[in-house]
């Protein structure tokens, strides 16, 4: 029972008819008493007198109605009034997003033919027992008896087109020898075909089919997200708990991380950091804003920390989706150099004349300049320092690789290069890589 109901049940008669019987003087006395109570309530609790006002306003108190305000504002220490907004507004937004778009979030099951190992008993002295008069004995032995298709992993994804295109992480569908099955929220399952894998970003596009159209997500503008804004992650947590929802905020932007597993790793730049729980199996799932727009693709978590997860910005994914729809593949511009970003420490260590740029340098097994590449054709050499790419200065926070990704294959770009203390300008026609 509410406080309003409790008060109403304890009052046997309406006070207004009683006041009318006592005469006009009692109304003025009651009015003064109410004003005194309102003033005291304002001092003691600010907006807490609003339920009482709502009660009086619900009654037909004609004389008092003129003096009762329709809205109540709280006044913070700054002196500027603000309207109170209940927290249930954000909660309702989360519920709405989950309810509307969870059906477009899918679980991806990875299956592979693995050896079937069986146990049998055999004598370690087989063939010699009778010759040496050895006792009969059997010990367990193991052997392969064919193969069997088994689940070996799982991840998440989300439907981006009504004909069944799904965006996920590349590492979820990286095995050419595996089979992939997509499970939708309604329990239906579909065999999935890998359309394209992104060789630079940890993204991939797969496809499922059925006669009826699929519900899809909306992709948002990740360039407009702000640190501190609320986000919602949905995915197949631990490969077991489908459509798991977690809520958090954007913890950081433009992060650079090295992610990987099973002996492979890759460096990802311009990554979103969030404290929304991202677990194994969440890989490839969507990161929503409160408008229900996907602003990121969940891709990694910090294993030695708590509540530190990472997502690839949606704007990167849009590029891949458009390419797959138009060409059926994902390609990138390619310069063809291995380099070391230069900062104060690298400058001091190698005795370089500048503290910025990209020092072309090979490693064991990787040449400084790739044979036949755009870099070789442009005349770049080992120990050259690329200072500017297409007019942009190369720095630690504005890397050469990020600049290259702004362009397309066959684009012509000018390179400002320092070679043996002299500055030269070279022109390169960017190649293509998948």
Image (spheres, grey):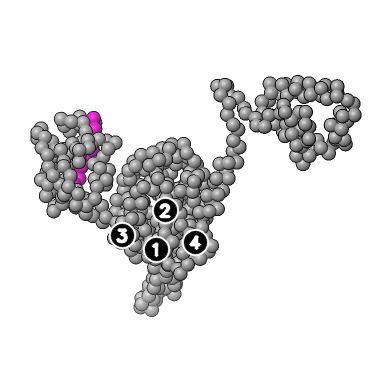
Q: Is residue 160 above or below residue 289?
A: below
Which residue does the image show at 18% across and 31% down from the upper left? 354
Q: Residues within 10 Å of mark 4 (few under 14, many from 20)?
A: many
Relative to the observer, which residue lies in front, 428 or 203? Answer: 428
Answer with mark 1 or mark 2, whichever residue precedes in sequence.
1
Residue bearing mark 1: 207
Residue 284, percent across and down?
Answer: 42, 53
Answer with mark 3 or mark 1, whichever residue precedes in sequence.
1
Q: In the image, which is nearer the foreground, mark 3 or mark 1?
A: 3
Residue 10 as seen in the image, left or right of residue 42: right
Place residue 432 in its image quadrant: bottom left
Residue bearing mark 2: 284
* Quarter of the C terminus within the rendering: bottom left
Which residue does the image show at 76% across and 33% down from the upper left? 56
Which residue does the image show at 44% across and 52% down from the upper left? 218
What range is drawn magenta here?
336-345
Residue 67 as seen in the image, left or right of residue 114: right
Residue 184 shows which numbered tag? 4
Residue bearing mark 3: 326
Distance, label 4 to label 3, CA atoms, is 26 Å
Distance, label 2 to label 3, CA atoms, is 22 Å
Q: Residues within 10 Å of mark 1 (few under 14, many from 20)?
A: many
Q: Secondary structure at mark 4?
A: loop
Answer with mark 4 or mark 1, whichever residue precedes in sequence.
4
Answer with mark 2 or mark 3, whichever residue precedes in sequence.
2
Q: Is residue 69 above or below residue 109?
A: above
Q: In the image, which is nearer the foreground, mark 2 or mark 3?
A: 3
Place residue 135 in its image quadrant: bottom left
Answer with mark 4 or mark 2, whichever residue precedes in sequence.
4
Q: Residues within 10 Å of mark 3 (few under 14, many from 20)?
A: few
């Amino acid at each position: 029972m509410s406080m309003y109901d409790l008060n109403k049940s304890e009052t046997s008669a309406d006070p207004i008819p009683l006041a009318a019987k006592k005469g006009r003087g009692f109304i003025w006395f009651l009015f003064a008493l109410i004003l005194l109570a309102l003033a005291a309530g304002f001092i003691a609790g600010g907006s807490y007198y609003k339920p009482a006002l709502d009660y009086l306003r619900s009654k037909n108190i004609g004389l008092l109605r003129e003096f009762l305000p329709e809205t109540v504002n709280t006044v913070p220490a700054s002196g500027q009034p603000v309207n109170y907004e209940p927290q249930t507004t954000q909660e309702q937004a989360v519920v709405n997003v989950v309810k509307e778009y969870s059906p477009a979030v899918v679980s991806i099951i990875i299956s592979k033919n693995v050896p079937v190992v069986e146990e049998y008993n055999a004598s370690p002295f087989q063939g010699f027992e009778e010759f040496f008069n050895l006792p009969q004995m059997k010990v367990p032995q193991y052997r392969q008896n064919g193969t069997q298709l088994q689940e070996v992993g799982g991840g998440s994804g989300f439907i981006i087109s009504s004909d069944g295109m799904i965006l996920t992480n590349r590492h979820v569908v990286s095995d050419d020898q595996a089979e992939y099955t997509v499970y939708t929220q309604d329990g239906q399952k579909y065999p999935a075909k890998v359309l394209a894998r992104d060789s630079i970003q940890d993204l991939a596009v797969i496809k499922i089919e059925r006669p009826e159209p699929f519900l899809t997500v909306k992709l948002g503008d990740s360039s407009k997200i702000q640190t501190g804004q609320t986000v919602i992650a949905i995915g197949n947590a631990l490969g077991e708990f489908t459509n798991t929802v977690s809520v958090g905020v954007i913890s950081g932007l433009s992060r650079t991380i090295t992610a990987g597993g099973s002996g492979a790793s890759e460096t990802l730049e311009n990554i979103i950091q969030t404290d929304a729980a991202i677990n194994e199996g969440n890989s490839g799932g969507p990161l929503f804003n409160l408008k229900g727009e996907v602003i990121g693709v969940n891709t990694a978590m910090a294993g030695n920390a708590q509540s530190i997860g990472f997502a690839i910005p949606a704007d990167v994914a849009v590029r891949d989706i458009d390419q797959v729809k138009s060409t059926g593949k994902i390609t990138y511009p390619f310069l063809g150099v291995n380099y070391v970003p230069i900062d104060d420490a690298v400058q001091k260590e190698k005795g370089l004349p500048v503290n910025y740029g990209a020092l072309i340098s090979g490693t064991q097994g990787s040449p400084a300049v790739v044979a036949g590449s755009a870099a070789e054709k442009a005349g770049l050499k080992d120990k050259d320092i690329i200072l500017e790419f297409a007019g942009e200065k190369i720095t630690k926070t504005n890397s050469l690789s990020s600049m290259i990704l702004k362009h397309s294959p066959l684009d012509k770009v000018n390179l400002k290069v320092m070679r043996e203390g002299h500055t030269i300008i070279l022109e390169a026609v960017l190649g293509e890589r998948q």
